[in-house]
Image: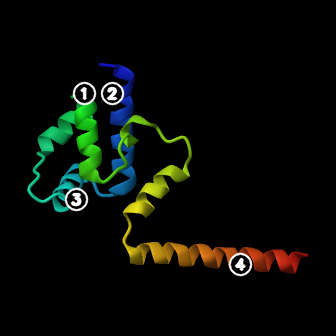
Amino acid sequence: MNTDIIEIRKSQLKKWMEQNYRSTRKQADLIRDMEKKNPGVHISQAEISAILRDRPIGEKKARKLESLIGLPIGWLDNPSTHPLDDYKIVYDRASETEKNLVLSVLQAIKLVQESNQSTSS
């Protein structure tokens, strides 16, 4: 198995967990969310811990994790090349209310920028 892809997958999983879970119980939070999104599925904390420490993340395991977490297929294999990539994933997972709030904030920022441009001209 290609050790580069294994390290990329581990790095991506750790990065995703850091960005999505602020508590000190990141592994427990991840498991809770995966089980809530996928009723009947159980993943032990020992399994997640082993993956993050020393167990390789093979192709099947990577696809399973992506599916359980709600990430696009192949996401663990590709380190982000653009800082907005990660925000897009968070946005895609957001509720409609959260998406509408983000859009409202972006529209307000645009209005302020346009106002600043017209006063400086």
* Distance (Cα) linking label 2 and label 4: 45 Å
Identified at 22% across, 59% down, the residue is: 33
Kind of residue sitting beneath label 4: Val
Residue position marked by numbered label 3 in the rendering:
33
Q: Earlier in the sequence, mark 2 or mark 4?
A: 2
Q: Earlier in the sequence, mark 4 or mark 3?
A: 3
Residue position marked by numbered label 2 in the rendering:
6
x, y percentage for residue 82?
56, 45
Identified at 10% across, 50% down, the residue is: 42
Q: Does residue 38 sit above or below 46 in this rendering?
A: below
Residue position marked by numbered label 4 in the rendering:
112
Residue position marked by numbered label 1 in the rendering:
56
Kind of residue sitting beneath label 3: Asp
* Circles 2 and 1: CB atoms closer than 8 Å: yes
* Circles 3 and 2: CB atoms closer than 8 Å: no
Kind of residue sitting beneath label 1: Pro
Q: Does residue 7 sit above or below 33 in this rendering?
A: above
* Distance (Cα) linking label 3 and label 2: 24 Å
Category of crowding for the residue at label 3, using alpha-carbon neighbours closer than 10 angstroms: few (below 14), some (14–19), many (at least 20): some
Kind of residue sitting beneath label 2: Ile
